[in-house]
Amino acid sequence: MKDNDRRSRRIALVADSVMNPAPGAPDLLAAIAARDWGVIGLPPERLGRAGIRQWIAGVGDQVREFCRHGMTVVAVLDRHDETVVADLEQNLAEPPAVAVPIHAWSNGDVEQLCAFLDANATRLP
Amino acid sequence: MKAMSSRPTRYAYIAHCLLNANSKVDEWAPCAGVHPELLGLLRDKGYVIRQMPCPELAFAGLNRFWQVRQQYETPAYRRHCAALAEPVAALMAQDLAEPGAEVVLVGVDGSPTMGVRFTSSGPDWGGRPDKPGDFDSDTVTGKGIFVEILFDQLAVRGIENPRVTAMTTDMPGGDEATALRDIAAVLDGGAG
């Protein structure tokens, strides 16, 4: 059996616009990956309210499982994703509630994002 | 976000763990988080990335043993996978409604859940405590349970199965370089 498990124990929930940056925008996902965070992609707004709610329900279950095991979970959200952000905040507030630090980016500032990640990073096991 | 280009948009639906190794079964995380070479391939080839959920993580937990398909073949797990697959199928349908849009699914071959060409089988495998050491399973042709259910849901929507490719490092003898070459070929339009 393998014994070289390399997981970082830190996960960022990321907006669709982070996963798929607009042409010319900085690649925030690459910055997140370079700092050894895993990601959980959030759905695009165009999925619609019902689909977003289903998608976020699955995300909430995963977040709670990571948190239950002491892993670090943060969110890098796009405030333009009104339905996604509202559903996520509502889901995470439901019992058992989990506190997830949020970075709401507006101009793709990589330095601000990295500072946020570093401030919330845990040590590698 | 849709890329601003005259080319039809290409979407890659990625198995969760390839962008979040923290979800892997214990002892099997090959990288810290995002698989860097895979992300590079997807960016270089201009794919919109859609990350699928990890059904095993929420159902069996982070400390689950490595399991075979027979262990997950339960009505409850199939219902769990169906609930997770529904919004994925809905989004894929939206993506494919764009003129000329293409979808590729990147799974994890050998996985009981996310395998696309190969899955794991072991009728007498029950877990680690009574069988320390090697994982007593066979690699067999077939899809993982989530992929099978997702494809069933696509069929209900009248959507053909997307082209598929997979990371193969969970399979006996699987190596990353070969897997990445295969993934790159399918992303380039090769048969999947």
Image (cartoon, coloured by chain):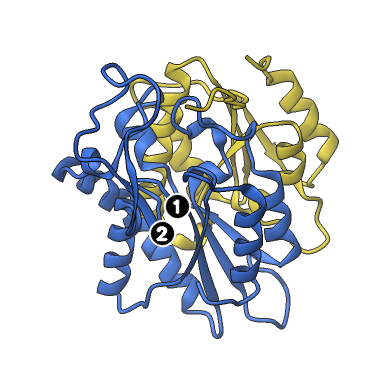
Which chain is displayed in yellow in the rendered image?
A: A
- Using the rendered view, name the quadrant where residue B131 is placed: top left
Circle 1 crowding by C-alpha within 10 Å: few under 14, some 14–19, many from 20: many
Q: Position of residue A90 (x, y in %)?
A: 42, 34
Circle 2 crowding by C-alpha within 10 Å: few under 14, some 14–19, many from 20: many
Distance CA(mark 2)–CA(mark 1): 6 Å
User: Residue at the location (54% across, 76% down)?
Assistant: B102
Q: Is the C-beta separation of discs 2 and 1 under 8 Å? A: yes
Under circle 2, the secondary element is loop
User: Residue at the location (78% across, 46% down)?
Assistant: A108
In this view of the protein, which residue sits in the foreground, A51 or B169? Answer: B169
Q: Locate residue A49 relative to residue A34 in the image: left or right.
A: left
In this view of the protein, which residue sits in the foreground, A48 or A2? Answer: A2
> Which chain is mark 1 on?
B
Residue named by callout 2: B116
Give the color of chain B as drawn.
blue
Q: Locate residue A39 relative to residue A90 in the image: left or right.
A: right
- Using the rendered view, name the quadrant where residue B150 is placed: bottom left
